Every structure is written in structure tokens, then in C-alpha cells.
Image (cartoon, rainbow, N blue to C red):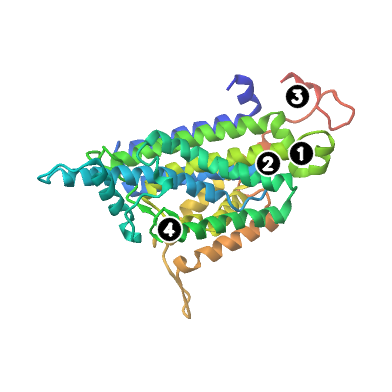
Amino acid sequence: MSDTFFKRNPSTLVFLAVLALFVLGVTLLAEGAGAGVISTSFVKTLGKTLCLALVAVAMDLVWGYTGILSLGHFAFFGLGGYMIGMWLMYARTQAIVVSSLAEAPIPATESEVVDAIGNQIFGVVGSSEFPLIWMFADSLLLQLVLVVAVPGVLALVFGWLAFRSRVTGVYLSILTQAMTLGLALYLFQNDSGLRGNNGLSGLQNLPGLDHVPQATMSIWFFWASAAALALGYLFAAWIVSGKFGSVLRGIRDNEARVRFLGYSVEGYKLFIFTVTAIIAGIAGALYYPQAGIINPAEIAPVASIYLAVWVAIGGRGRLYGAVIGAIFVSLVSSWFTGGQAPDVNLGFYTLKWVDWWLIVLGLSFVLVTLFAPRGIGGLVDLWSERRRPDRHGADLGPGAGALREKEANE
């Protein structure tokens, strides 16, 4: 990134600086690498929150800047988690099986080892054979490729079919939600090849690193999540700051006019839809090893609706707004649903936040939409507007509100 880019986008430099300070502070206070003030479980929560912020940036690109209200982007997030989870579960099970069979009087053959691994993984769904989709599960490199390829190809095919038919607005949102629901229902089946409702578990145990304590591993994943968020934010800021970003905003505001000007609206939409799906897949691949488990419920349509709520509350059309919304809602949700928020005794009724949190979240979304469309990020906008210099000097444009001489020289 050149100096010119950061001059045109000072908020990006501010964001990276704040993120770096945050990472440094958490590292110094964490159990794994610092003073032990912050627990390992909370470090994992913070790492997962950064992953959610990354997928929120992807959602803001596709919705806030392009105007495509996708209610299926959390499906790509979940697919990224499944792809890395397959390798984690296979490698961990392989180590256990090989260690167990090493004590046998007769060495086990390679096929016997594979059968034993399959029985350990799929015995819960009454099977012992590896489905075709697990053919690369023994290779970390290939599964990392699938983390990018599977969400990307699905988004490319779906987007091509939808955008070439010029499906827009609420109809496109319904289609993305239907795609997510169909995928979730398929994964719930035991014969889907991904253990049905049981999902993939034990993902927090990295193969070959059994000697590394979870406190240290949580810091590693926290660093990786922060690095991914920084790179994703930079990439998104670069996209929206140039001509490409102007076309995206034009599509959002008046698609017909942009098409009339000769731009390939469908091509722009397909590109941003596919790229953001890949970003979501990468975020999911970092999230679920910290969560330790993934199942089809993670891909349910309601998760994608939550994602849209985060972006709306933070302020769509502002990358930092998406990050603020995801972090704020995620941490507040953990506080309310984790039993840390005290119950409120109203005399005739005891208000338990675990039961009422989703209602509070829904009301917040409605109130923000009606009365504060800029979201929490709008507070940053107000502060920025107050810092603008007083305009005086000669007009440099045809109107009285045009750029003035002093501003041009600054």
C-alpha cells in the first residue's frame, strides 16, 4: 500500500494501529504469553470475535457497498470451517489410532489403519467408510486449498445463475437464504459425509502439538485471526477506495444507470460475491479450531441474519462500522448468554437475559434501522465532521459549496 492510499484512507491506518495495540495488550495480559490477567477461554472468545469481524467486513462489501443483501454468507463461513475441520479430525484420529495399534503384537497394515480411522470418525453415524469428499482429508495443503475453493466455487456458480437472470432485491435475498437452508438440511443428514448433526469435534487439538498448552495455542490463533482481519480490512479498503469501489456504490444506488453507462453490472456483482465468500471461508477456517466444534446448526439461515444485524448495527457502508458492529454484538452476546449478566427481578417477573437476549438484539436492529441508519459507526462520522477545517477563501468550483482555495493547498 502506498502513502497515497493511506492519505486518502486515514481511517484504515487508524484501524490498523488500534488493532495492533489491541493485539499487543491482549498478548501481554494473556495466560499463554503474558501476565495471566486474561483467561485462555476469553482469549479464544476474542480470537473468535476477530474472525466474526472479518466475515462482517465481507458482508459489508457485498451489502453495504454493493447493495446485495445476502442471507447466505455465513454458509460460506461454515464451509471454510468444515474444510479445515476435516483435516484436523482426520489427523488427530490418525495419531490416536496409530498409537493404539502400535501396541498390537502384529503391525497393522495401511488399510487396517484407514479402516480404524474411518470407524472412529464415522462410527457415530453407523458407518466406517470414508465418503468421497474426504479424499484429501489427510493433506493439510489440499484442505487449505479447499477452504478457499469450496466457498468460492459455490458462490461463483450460485452468483452466475442468479445475476445472469438479473434477480435483485428481496428475491435475491430469499434465494441466498434458500441456498443456506438447503445446505444446512443436507448437512444434517447422516449420509452427507460430515457426520450429520454430530458435526466435527475436537478441532481445538492441533495434530503434532499435543505438548503445547491450550493457553499458548489460543494466543497463536488470536494472532492469526488478527492478521487475517488486518489483511482482509486492507484488501476491502483498497477495493472500495478506487474506481472499482465507485462502480460498486453506483450499482448499490442506481443499478440501471450503471448498466446504461456500459459497465458489466453482473460481472462486478459476481466478482464481489465470490471474493467475499472466499473471505468468509477463511474466517470460518480460523474460527472453528478456536470453537472446537462445528455442526450444521452453524450454517442455519438465522446465522446469516445475525451477520446482517451486526453490519446494520455497526453501520453498513463503512468497513470500520462492520467491525465495530460484529465486535460489539459478539462480546455483548457472550456476556448476556454466558450467565454473566445479572437477572433483573421485577417483582412479578424475573428477567433472565439468556432468554431475552435475542429479543433485545432484534429490537436493537429495528431501532437502529429506523432512527440511526448510520449505526454505531455514525458516531465516528460525527466526530470526523467536527474536525473538518472551516471553509474560507476563494471558491474553486462553479458553486458556493465547492472546494475552496485554502483546502486545495492543504
Which label belongs to residue 259?
none
Question: Which residue is denoted by mark 3 in the rendering?
Answer: 407
Q: For residue 38, say whether it is visible.
A: no
* Disc 4 + disc 2, Cβ < 8 Å: no
Other residues around mark 4 within 10 Å, as few (<14) / some (14–19) / many (≥20):
some
Q: Nearer the viewer, mark 4 or mark 2?
A: 4
Judge the density around disc 3: few (<14), some (14-19), many (≥20) Cα neighbours within 10 Å.
Answer: some
Q: Which residue is mark 4?
A: 191
Q: Position of residue 59 (x, y in %)?
A: 60, 45
Q: Is residue 348 visible to the viewer in this orientation of the structure?
A: yes
Q: Earlier in the sequence, mark 2 or mark 3?
A: 2
Q: Which residue type carries mark 4?
A: Asp
* Residue matched to label 2: 65
Picture quadrant where residue 362 is located: bottom right
Distance (Cα) linking label 1 and label 3? 27 Å
Kindly report the distance in space between the C-alpha atoms of the residues bearing marks 4 and 2.
Answer: 39 Å
Seen from the viewer's position, the closer of residues 101 and 294 is 101
Count the numbered circles shown.
Answer: 4
Q: Earlier in the sequence, mark 4 or mark 2?
A: 2
Crowding at label 2, few (<14), some or many (≥20) Cα neighbours within 10 Å?
many
What residue lies at 69% left-to-right and 40% top-to-bottom?
Answer: 269
Q: Which amino acid does the dot numbered 2 rest on?
A: Tyr
* Mark 2 vs mark 1, CA separation in Å: 9 Å
Question: Residue 63: horizontal and vertical position, in percent?
Answer: 66, 46
Q: Nearer the viewer, residue 161 or 397?
A: 161
Instruction: Please give left or right for residue 210 compared with residue 272 in the image.
Output: left
Amino acid tagged 1: Gly
Q: Secondary structure at mark 4?
A: helix
Give the secondary structure at mark 1: helix
Kindly identify the residue that appears in the image at 33 percent across and 55 percent down: 122
Report the residue marked by disc 1: 250
Of tags 1 and 3, the one toward the viewer is: 1
